[in-house]
Amino acid sequence: MNVTIRKATPRDIPRILELYEQLTEEKLNVSPAKAEQVFAEIVAMPNQEFLVAEKDGLVLGTLFLQIVPNLSHDARPWAIVENMVVDRRYHRQGIGRLLIEYALNNCREAGCYKVQLLSQKKRLEAHQFYRSMGFQDSALGFRLYF
């Protein structure tokens, strides 16, 4: 499969939102204007990458990568992967692997000492995938929603 990993652009926003609906299993109530505003804010911030996996003009997956400056661990940064999703029609075709590998290479180049991600407890297939990519379920995470 000839898939390209690239930085997301504003024209990708509608498709990214479709993918997020698959991830969250709920309808997103974000207006196009608000989505464009937030996207512009995200890509304007340093140390962040909004990535998409594309084949033949169709965005098949996406992830958000943020590299965080840090004073511990010899002042080496760390990274967080968020909103990783591949269209369910294209699972098990190596697209998620390409996205994660691309992000991990960027983390290595930035000198990160770790990469962290969270996954909903019910996403057992995703957990297997992340383990196959070398991630370990080595911490207990907590969230507080507002």
Image (cartoon, rainbow, N blue to C red):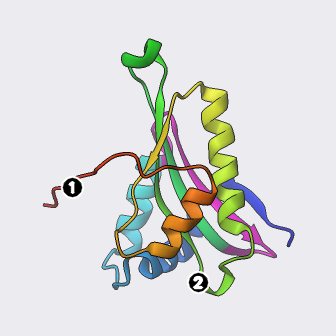
Question: Which of the 4 image quadrants contains residue 52?
Answer: bottom right
Give me the residue at 62% from left, 46% from top: 103
Circle 1 packing at 10 Å, graded few (<14), some (14-19), many (20+), is: few
Circle 2 packing at 10 Å, graded few (<14), some (14-19), many (20+), is: few
The extreme right residue here reads 2
Q: Which residue is mark 2?
A: 88
As for residue 52 lying within the magenta part, the answer is yes
In the displayed structure image, the side of residue 40 where residue 27 appears, left or right: left
- The mark nearer the N terminus, 1 or 2, is 2
Q: Nearer the viewer, residue 7 or 109?
A: 109
In the displayed structure image, the side of residue 114 where residue 38 appears, left or right: left
The extreme left residue here reads 146
Q: Which residue is mark 1?
A: 143
Give me the residue at 76% from left, 74% from top: 57
Q: Which mark is residue 49?
A: none
As for residue 67 lying within the magenta part, the answer is no
Q: Nearer the viewer, residue 114 or 53?
A: 114
Q: What amino acid is labelled 1 in the image?
A: Arg
The extreme top residue here reads 74
Q: Is residue 13 visible?
A: no
Give the magenta part as a residue range: 43-59
Q: Position of residue 137 (x, y in %)?
A: 42, 52
Q: Position of residue 105 (x, y in %)?
A: 69, 39
Query: Could you tell me which secondary element the residue under label 1 belongs to?
Result: loop
